[in-house]
Amino acid sequence: MNMLTKTTKSIVDEQLNDKLPRFTSGDTIRVNVKIKEGEKYRIQAFEGVVIKTQGSGITFSVCVRKNSNGVFVERTFPVHSPIVDSIDVLKRGRVRRARIYYIRKLSGKAARIKEIIVSKDKKNAEKAAAVKKPATKKVEAKPVESNKEEK
């Protein structure tokens, strides 16, 4: 790798959010977003159904649709942005499409998504897998020299 690629890779690695759970289209998630008011920051939750996921790496983004007082609101979040504080998966949904734009036309019970029941053991395993373990340094063992005298 040349110097520019190494520098770019190091900058991107610093900005990646390692504590993200695994989610797909149809899942209900809560995105906690940092909102700046004056000089203070507060966290606002945006809870809804994942309509689509897009991109990979640092450009990964997710579109979430929620019902706010009878009005549906869609918002796209760049997942690795510093304004995204955390993402929590509330429910797993079973859909057969990657982009569920058809849900925009549905209303009432037709707009429901079938839920996948996940056991507590699997939830704990997913949380453990979501937290990235720190890398351990490999230490090479040096050969031991013997001081045995020959007879």
Image: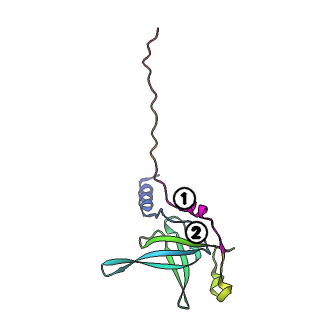
Check residue 120 for magenta coloring: yes
Locate residue 3, reporting x and y percent: 41, 54
How many labels were placed on the picture? 2
In this view, the residue in front, 48 or 6, is 48
User: Would you place residue 122 above or below residue 28 in this image?
Assistant: above
Q: Is residue 74 left or right of residue 145?
A: right
Residue 24 image point, x, y percent: 60, 70
Q: Residue furthest left?
A: 39
Question: Is residue 73 at all visible to an observer of this figure?
Answer: yes
Residue visible at 58% across and 64% down in the picture: 123
Residue 150 on image: x %, y %: 46, 11
Q: Is the Cβ of the residue at disc 1 closer than 8 Å to that at disc 2?
A: no
Question: Would residue 100 be counted in the magenta stretch?
Answer: no
Task: Kindly state the secondary structure of the residue where label 1 is placed.
Answer: helix
Question: At 54% across and 58% down in the image, what residue appears?
Answer: 129
Q: Which residues are magenta?
A: 115-135
Corner quadrant of residue 146: top left
Question: Relative to 68, does residue 14 appear above or below in the rendering?
Answer: above
For label 2, the residue is 23
User: Within 10 Å of the Cα at label 2, are there few (<14), some (14-19), or many (20+) other Cα atoms?
Assistant: some
Q: Secondary structure at mark 2?
A: loop
Report the disc number at residue 82: none
Locate residue 71: give its quadrant.
bottom right
Q: Describe residue 51's horizontal placement relative to residue 87 as left or right.
A: right
- Mark 1 Cα within 10 Å, few/some/many (few <14, many 20+)? some
Q: Give the residue number, with chain letter if any, for mark 1.
A: 129
Residue displayed at 43% across by 13% down: 149
